[in-house]
Amino acid sequence: MTAPFVYGTLVKHSVHSLEAPYQVTAVTFNDTAEQVISGGIDNELKVWDIRKQQVLHCLKGHADTITGISLSPDGSYILSNSMDNTFAFGIFVPMCRLALLIVMFIWDTTSRKILYKLPGHNGSVNDVDFSSKEPLILSGSSDKTLYLGEIED
């Protein structure tokens, strides 16, 4: 079993070990550092409570190993990418549904309607990120492309 470790700076060793059922390939903290989001070879995102040392939510949708996770600077949105040539964008709330296809759909979570689409990649999506200054997302792929998309309000 593979586990993400949380290390303490004063004690110089792990202070928590979170036991995942499969190999973990991507991790990030939430905006308050009270939770950890992990992804792995089971194709699921897991939201962990660090204090309780347990999974709070599992987010399913990818068809292959998750290779990257990024959380928006305000902690409201999550991006994940996978070896299945897709990246997912979702509102970071319990039991949210991730939009997941080669084309990225931006959803209005109130009306549950698609606001607009962003083009997708033709190869594995290797990394995704949010801009800390502007409402922008970025993805990079094995198809040798970078896509930059604007999140409209």
Image (cartoon, rainbow, N blue to C red):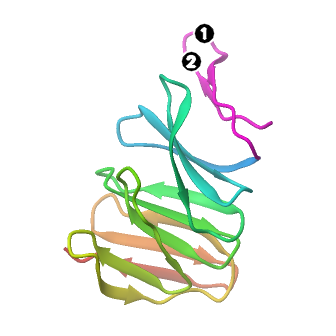
Dot 2 crowding, Cα within 10 Å, few <14, some 14–19, many 20+: few
Dot 1 crowding, Cα within 10 Å, few <14, some 14–19, many 20+: few
Q: Residue at x 69, y 39 (%)?
A: 20
User: Which of the image's four quarters has the C terminus?
Assistant: bottom left
Say if 33 sits above or below 128 in the image: above
Q: Do the residues labelled 1 and 2 touch (CB within 8 Å)?
A: yes
Residue 13 on image: x %, y %? 67, 16
Residue 150 visible in the current orientation: no
Say if 11 sits above or below 136 in the image: above
Looking at the image, which is closer to me, 93 or 31?
93
Say if 147 sits above or below 34 in the image: below
Q: Residue at x 62, y 57 (%)?
A: 44
Residue 18 on image: x %, y %? 64, 30
- 14 in magenta: yes
Question: Relative to residue 117, is residue 144 drawn left or right?
Answer: right
Q: Residue at x 42, y 65 (%)?
A: 97
Residue 105 on image: x %, y %? 40, 81
- 85 in magenta: no
Disc 1 target residue: 11
What secondary structure do most residues of the magenta stretch adopt? loop
User: Which of the image's four quarters has the N terminus?
Assistant: top right
- Where on the picture, by quarter, is residue 67? bottom right
Residue 104 on image: x %, y %? 46, 81
Disc 2 target residue: 8
Q: Looking at numbered disc 2 in the image, what kind of residue is underneath it?
A: Gly
Give, as a single range, the part of the protein colored magenta: 1-22
Looking at the image, which is closer to me, 106 or 7?
106
Q: Which residue is drawn at 54% across and 73% down?
A: 87
Question: Relative to residue 140, is residue 95 drawn left or right?
Answer: left
Q: Looking at numbered disc 1 in the image, what kind of residue is underneath it?
A: Val
Residue 94 visible in the current orientation: yes
Question: Gap in Å between the C-alphas at discs 1 and 2?
Answer: 6 Å
